[in-house]
Image (cartoon, rainbow, N blue to C red):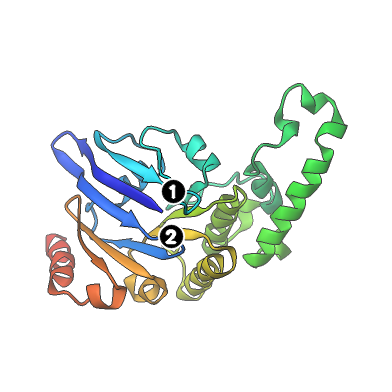
Amino acid sequence: MLITKNLRKFFGGIKAVNDVSVSFNRGKINLIIGPNGSGKTTLVNLLTGFYKPDSGKILYDPSGSNTYVDITNLPPEDRVKLGITRSFQIPSPFMRLTVLENMLVAYQNNPGENFYKALFKKTWIKQEHLATEKAFRILKILSLDHLWDEYAANLSGGQLKLLELGRALMTDPKLLVLDEPIGSVNPRIAEEILSKIIDLRDKLHITSIIVEHRLDLILDYADYLYVMHEGKIILEGDPKKVINYPIVSEIYLGEASVR
């Protein structure tokens, strides 16, 4: 679904992403792991348009017809229009808005946001109703519908992660890129979030690329695993096989010894 070719991003002398050529599988949960500083978040920022690569290409096939679009230099908002949406490691909703209001902010192409059309209620009121119905459907999937009128500031860490996921779903993504979706939440909520991602794959056919550190929880949910180290993808394949390669333990133990 998404291919990178010789992708590079350097920060001074730091080779954050160094000549990465990789393919991400359609209809799968693609998991990227690696020690701190291995380049995972930089790669995510390149895939979603928040960084521009120094060299290389990013190709995307939204329809599954093997017709690839070169999105290397597209800004994030144009990638969203093509179906690529991301979440962030630290959720950042509008804290003084309710859960429902946060969801509606993420709704795309509402005519009521047009300066001239906003003056004529009949041109956008139906779309407002459709957006609200859509928001409630997604909130129900995420088990947040009972909190629709709660201010985001009052949500727990796990609920904020789910709201972040919900806002991404309001854009009708084909590909979700999730940066530590279960980071810093308790195991019960983490399992709930991961089960929702499974539902998105199975029921809505949404592909995921996930960066995550909590291997004890997420490995059982991943379809395909990529191991990143020093800016490169050094291993990929079946999660249960790849995680047992000695080099994976070595790079994580190396990180621990540095600490």
Quadrant for the C terminus, please: bottom left
Between residue 153 and residue 206, name the one nearer to us: 206
Between residue 99 and residue 141, name the one nearer to us: 141
Between residue 225 and residue 113, name the one nearer to us: 225
Q: Position of residue 10 (x, y in %)?
A: 20, 37
Label 2: few (<14), some (14–19) or many (≥20) C-alpha neighbours in 10 Å = many
Q: Kindly identify which residue carries mark 2.
A: 26
Q: Is residue 143 left or right of residue 78?
A: right
Label 1: few (<14), some (14–19) or many (≥20) C-alpha neighbours in 10 Å = some
Q: Kindly identify which residue carries mark 1.
A: 61
Quarter of the view holding residue 254: bottom left
Tell which circle, 2 or 1, labels the residue nearer the N-terminal end: 2
Secondary structure beneath dot 1 equals loop
Quadrant for the N terminus, please: bottom left
Tag 1: residue type? Asp
Q: Is residue 107 left or right of residue 175?
A: right
Tag 2: residue type? Arg
The residue positioned 33% from the left and 34% from the top of the image is 52
Pointer 2 with pointer 1, Cβ within 8 A: yes
Q: Position of residue 217 (x, y in %)?
A: 39, 74
Q: Position of residue 193 (x, y in %)?
A: 52, 68
The residue positioned 62% from the left and 50% from the top of the image is 170
The answer, for residue 39, to whether it is visible in the render is no
Q: Is residue 162 left or right of residue 137?
A: left
Between residue 186 and residue 199, name the one nearer to us: 199
Q: Is residue 73 left or right of residue 155?
A: left
The residue positioned 64% from the left and 40% from the top of the image is 108
Q: Residue furthest top?
A: 116
Q: Position of residue 43 (x, y in %)?
A: 31, 47
